[in-house]
Image (cartoon, grey):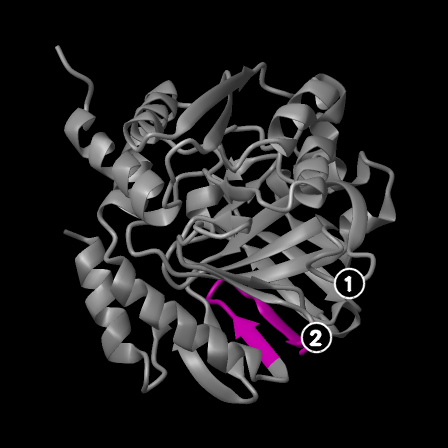
Amino acid sequence: MFDIYEFELVKAAEILVREMFKVKRGETFVITADTESDIRVVNATAQAVFAAEGKPMVILLPSPLGVGKAADPMLPIDALSGALKDADAWIEFNNQWLLYSTPYERAINENKRLRYMCLVGMNAEMMIRVIGRVEYKLLEKFLLKITEITKNAKKMRITTPAGTDVKFENDPDRPIYCDMGNASKPGVYMLSGQISWAPKFETIKGVIVFDGSVVPPMGLLNEPIKLYIKKGKIVDIKGGKEAVEFSKWLQSFRNPNMLRLAHVCYGFNPGAKLTGNILEDERVWGCTEWGIGYLSPIDAPPNGIPAPSHTDGICLNSSVWLDDIQIMDEGKVIHPELRKLSEKIERCGKI
């Protein structure tokens, strides 16, 4: 007997370890997971690290009841921090993610050689689609170009068929992250196919409609959630039962920063599909994603957004304007320099 995608998973893990992390002989490579993680992915990655002559260290944790700092009370904070502070590389496969938790912050701030990649909730089938079957050279060329033109834009507008219509200004002094899957140098990395940045918070205004997923606390949405935004803060939430649930979840922290918009992202991974796993959902081709709550000071110096947790919501089929020039129309790239490359990448992702 064999597991489904057993052969393909080995290839994806090899790409992750050898091509993306470029693991060197003798490096300590920590893999964290929780009891909701896909153990096949964990084992395949550890095997690939060992085959590359690295030293894999798998840390399996009970699943916390929250993410980010909300997970802190259920984590072995000091022991976990100690392991991460002495590692060369760290992949997070936790379903209830450690990103933004205290061990994460300690590791990033104190271990300057650490290469971290957030692959929360990764499962075998997804790993094959979003890593094993992606044409990285083509995708990298596309992502670098759209990052460049976005960084040069002062003002932006995003709309969707579901009702999103939001405007904001970019801050040229804040970093814009282009996730291309290259984790060969120290730093924080995400799965390839996303571009993320923090706009000028006080300029964000309009309506944001989540019609894909919201994680946490829900996952896939059965009905849209409509957020009304003024000066970068949620002032009202409309919709059905899920909108009520989302509002109660945000208010449960009793912290006004949980109502603040933290970042905006493009989604551009040709293998990604809407599944309820936010790692994949926020890379669905042509979507935009908004983060709410906590934001690291690194992303928006000097203070970021100090909040007890973080959530991400997906807006499907986005149209985007940069300084009044439209580059996307309902999820399709129409920018003249990017359209043909975009079409070629999407075809490769469907093989």
Residue ID at (19%, 23%): 4
Upstream in sequence: badge 2 or badge 1: 2
Q: Which residues are magenta?
A: 156-173
Structural crowding at the residue carrying mark 2, measured as other residues with C-alpha within 10 Å and reported as few (<14), some (14–19) or many (≥20): few
Query: Mark 2–mark 1 contact, CB under 8 Å?
Result: yes
Q: Is residue 87 magenta?
A: no
Query: In the picture provided, is 10 more to the left or to the right than 106?
Result: left
Q: Residue furthest front?
A: 26
The residue beneath circle 1 is 301
Q: CA distance from mark 2 to mark 1?
A: 9 Å
Q: Residue at x 68, y 27 (%)?
A: 81
User: Residue 119 at x, y = what percent?
Assistant: 46, 39
| Above or below for 322 versus 298 | below
Residue at point 59%, 79% (across, down): 156
Q: Residue furthest top?
A: 1
Direction from residue 303 to residue 90 in the image, left or right = left
Left or right: 211 in relation to 45: right
Decide if residue 221 is in sight here: no
Numbered tag placed on residue 173 in the rendering: 2
Q: Which amino acid lies under the numbered mark 1 shown in the image of this protein?
A: Pro
Which residue occupies 35% across, 74% down? 333
Question: Looking at the picture, does residue 331 appear above or below residue 45?
Answer: below
Residue 206, position as x, y percentages in the image: 68, 70
- Quarter of the view holding residue 270: bottom left
Q: Is residue 159 magenta?
A: yes
Asked if one can make out residue 21 in the rendered structure from this viewpoint, the answer is yes
Q: Quadrant of residue 177?
A: bottom right
Q: Secondary structure at mark 1?
A: loop
Task: Name, please, the residue furthest toward the bottom.
Answer: 324
